[in-house]
Image (cartoon, rainbow, N blue to C red):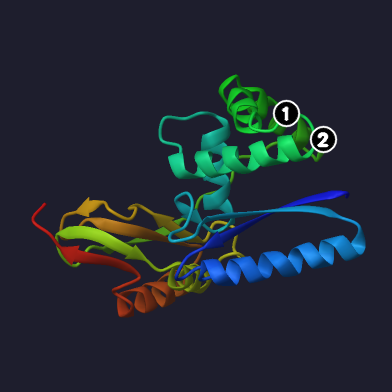
Amino acid sequence: ARRVLIDIPVGPTAKVRSPEAAADLTRQLEHVAAAVGLAVRVVHTDGSAPVGRGIGPALEARDVLSVLRRQADAPADLAQRALLLAGHVLEFGGAAPVGGGQALAAATLAEGRAWQKFLEICEAQGGFREPAMAPLRHDILAPCSGRVIGIDNRRLSRIAKLAGAPKVPCAGIDLLVRNGDFVERGEPLYTLHAGSPGALAYAADYALSQPTTVQVIEDDE
């Protein structure tokens, strides 16, 4: 490897919580890269909420496949993040002029070439298989009607782990709302996926004890 692109999501519940911390980490990464002869490019992105809907191997794979297949229900934020980073990679590697990488990435996706290349990669590694979905699910519901004002990445990550992810590939969380969405009382905020009743109950108990994991404030819209 001669070049490395690093995405650093920055947000109050992301691993890197502030622009200052991101800048400090970037300086350290650049210092290490220079010492080992790597060209590095660091991109700071919005880490205020998860990107895509799925948290857990199979659910994240489902999201990626929906973007590659250009499905109508594909998570728009995941597609946008992928195109941003792919654009940087294309420019960094010399495949696109400066400022032209994202347009090339978008065309590659829109024309189906990204999906075809993905299938070729899968075939070279044993063939493509659809990710298996969990047999057990449980919805976590909005406690009131209102607007989503915060999504806690760290708590969602912990809940997904309690459900069995990533050890159990089908386990995790399907996030159904985004910041700014209006929800009705009793509407699902996210769905737990698990491979066993015990894991599902364990994750659900913790999720219900953390009502501000997806924070909703009352709002008459």
Q: Nearer the viewer, residue 164 or 50?
A: 50
Q: Which mark is residue 124?
A: 2
Residue at screen point 67% across, 69% down: 25
* Residue 22, percent from left and from top: 60, 66
Relative to 154, say whether 146 is above or below: above
* Residue 171, percent from left and from top: 52, 61
Q: Is residue 10 left or right of residue 148?
A: right
Q: Earlier in the sequence, mark 1 or mark 2?
A: 1
Q: Is residue 20 left or right of residue 188?
A: right
Do we see residue 135 in this rendering?
A: yes
Picture quarter containing residue 72?
A: top left
Q: Nearer the viewer, residue 62 or 24?
A: 24
* Residue 90, percent from left and from top: 72, 35
Do we see residue 16 in this rendering?
A: no
Q: Which mark is residue 33?
A: none
Which residue in the protein does label 1 denote? Answer: 96
* Residue 214, percent from left and from top: 32, 66
Picture quarter containing residue 9?
A: bottom right
In three-dimensional space, the C-alpha distance between marks 1 and 2, rounded to whole angstroms, equals 26 Å
Camera-near label (1 vs 2) is: 1
Q: Nearer the viewer, residue 81 or 212?
A: 81
Residue at screen point 40% across, 69% down: 152
Q: Secondary structure at mark 2?
A: helix
Picture quarter containing residue 87?
A: top right
Relative to 117, say whether 12 is above or below: below
Mark 2 is on which residue type?
Ala
Mark 1 is on which residue type?
Ala
